[in-house]
Image (cartoon, rainbow, N blue to C red):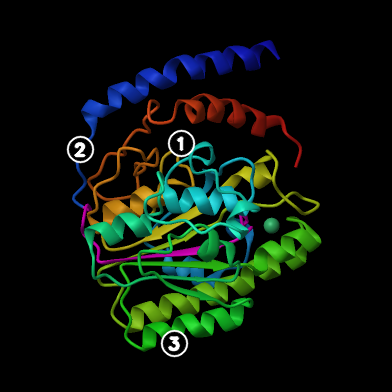
Amino acid sequence: MKRLFCLLLAVLMIFPFSAAASAASHTKSPSFGAYKHVFIIGVDGAGRFIKDADTPNFDRIFKNGAVKYTARTEVPTDSGPNWGSILTGVSYFKHKIHNGNSGERQRTSDTKYPTVFTYVRRAQPDAELASFVNWNNVNFGMIETDIGVTEVRVGDDAALTDEICAYFDEGNAPAVFFVQLDGVDAAGHAHGSASDEYFAAIHTADGYVGRIYDAVDRNGLMEDGLFIVVADHGHKKTGGHGRFSRRETDTTIAVAGKTVVPGGTLDKTTRDRDVAAITLAALGVERPKTMSARVPANLFENTTGEMRSFFRDMLDGIISPVMWLVTLVWPG
Ligand SMILES: [Zn+2]
């Protein structure tokens, strides 16, 4: 216990200084604005377990990509807080989106912590932006209603994938495209993250990811496209999530694109929210001052990673190291 306390104290003392020192060392990436399209494919509930599943499509898509299986989630490890952070680039303390309020509330672009859709809309007034989801809370309670995002909700992953493929084959070329698949989360709840059923569901989702990638690619969009697969949280061994175990808080971020480091691992402090910063950087949209997401190291070629600003979100800066220590001992 005493050792844990000393470690925590050390983390807390070093953290602000490393963040302050970083401001000077940041260099702008040659990947900044190198892309016209970012595809964010969300696999709800898959956590780190894509690593251990049979995923031939994931493997071929990210053969020359950068993959991290231990990116850290927000806590609570639920979909609202984490899709919220992945889309807004800020902590749960800031965006305050949870499973309950995302089912009832409609956000508009004047909100303090908008999603990447709003930032890209401001920079590219005529761009096509789209979100295709199984869990309607993403479209209903997270994406701003006044910025003209094409929103589709289909409550079945296979049928949702059909709609997505048709959308691309009709010639749509979105700047930002978000997908949320839900089948893996359902299997996790029913059977737990050590079950054959859960890994079978990841294999099934991998088939959908492959179909989506092929639709994007055959329509020429991967030439200037960045393709990301991300999960919002994992599952306990016995099923369910929301707490602090490694099984729940480790999650996958995989990135493929023309300037991505082949075999890149993304750095140790990568958070799921960093997908928002990666998205904006790829499209050449300046990262807003309110955003504590940043582009990790070992992701884009010839690019040093950005440090996470402690001062933009001090509560998160203090709580996150504590939570990280808790994840090391919390049973899952
Ligand atoms: Zn769930």
Q: Does the image show residue 139?
A: yes
Q: Quadrant of residue 9?
A: top right
The magenta stretch spans which residues?
Answer: 31-49
- Foreground disc of the pair 1, 3: 3
Quarter that holds the C terminus = top right
10 Å crowding of disc 1: few (<14), some (14-19), many (20+): some
Q: Could you say where residue 238 lies in the image, as x and y percent from the top left?
A: 81, 52
Q: Is mark 3 within 8 Å of ligand 1?
A: no
Q: Does the image show residue 265?
A: no
Direction from residue 203 to residue 195 in the image, left or right: right
First in sequence, mark 3 or 2: give its number: 2
Disc 2 designates what residue? Answer: 27
Disc 3 designates what residue? Answer: 166
Disc 1 designates what residue? Answer: 269
Q: Amino acid at mark 3?
A: Ala
State the separation of the CA atoms marked 1 and 2: 18 Å
Name the quadrant where ligand 1 sits. bottom right
State the separation of the CA atoms marked 1 and 3: 37 Å
Q: Amino acid at mark 1?
A: Thr
Q: Which secondary structure lies at badge 3?
A: helix
Direction from residue 87 to residue 204 in the image, left or right: right
Quarter that holds the N terminus = top right
